Each structure stands twice: as structure tokens, then as C-alpha cells.
Amino acid sequence: MTTPLAPADSPPAPHRLRLRLYVAGQSAHSRLAVTRLHALLAEYPYCSADTEIFDVLEDPHRAFEAGVFLTPMLVRLEPLPECSLFGNLSDRDALVRMLLLGPPPP
């Protein structure tokens, strides 16, 4: 038995993410990472992302326990497996792959 394919114009299936972005205060790279992450997620209306922004300067002990040694650092907590991306998120293709998003909807 074969499963029929969805029409090309059908909306993509909902996509749910749980993310944590570690930043260091209001540094230029931290602000850029936050801006780029929000901008990219806005391009994917079918994606629901619970995003926690965590400032390592406010709680360095928790950051140390989480193994954060470089900021900005984006961690995809769900869906599993967890993975991390470092830097100001300027590599859009790497960010899209990490978030399992695929091409943006038309």
C-alpha cells in the first residue's frame, strides 16, 4: 500500500523547538545572535519555538554547570538529540540545519 503525497501547496507540518541561547550581557555579538535568531524564526510561521535567553554574566555558576565556555551559544534542547551552535549565528545555513527547518515557506 502506498501513502499519497501531500499537495505541493499544502502547509508544512507544525515544527516545535525548545532552545536556549547563552549570551554575555549586551555585547555586540550577543545582541546580533538574538536578532538573527528571532529574524530567522519569524520566517517560519509553522515553527513554534520556546526560546530562553540566558545571560551568563547574571548566573556564571549555572553557565559553568551547563558547560558553557563560549558565548553566544545556541542549544537546541528539543527535538533530541541536543546540539549546539557557537557564535553570533551569522551562518544562516548552519542555523537552519541545526533547527531542522528546511527551506522557508513561499
Image (cartoon, rainbow, N blue to C red):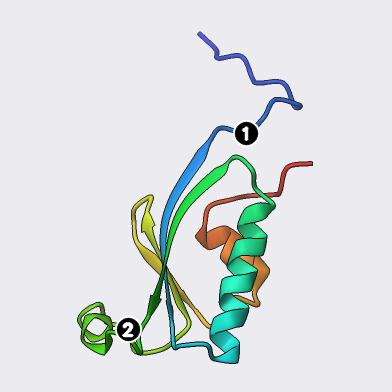
Q: Earlier in the sequence, mark 1 or mark 2?
A: 1
The image quadrant of residue 7 is: top right
76 left or right of 44?
A: left
Q: Is residue 5 above or below residue 77?
A: above
Image spot of residue 16 (x, y percent): 46, 44
Mark seen at residue 12: 1
Mark seen at residue 2: none
- Residue at horizontal 67%, vertical 62%? 39
- Residue at horizontal 42%, vertical 61%? 19
58 left or right of 52?
A: left
Residue matched to label 2: 68
- Residue at horizontal 35%, vertical 90%? 57
Q: Is residue 2 above or below residue 23?
A: above
Determine the secondary structure under disc 2.
loop
Image spot of residue 46 (x, y percent): 60, 40
Determine the secondary structure under disc 1.
loop
The image quadrant of residue 76 is: bottom left
The image quadrant of residue 83 is: bottom left
Image spot of residue 89 (x, y percent): 59, 75
Q: In this orientation, does residue 88 appear?
A: no
Q: Quarter holding the C terminus?
A: top right
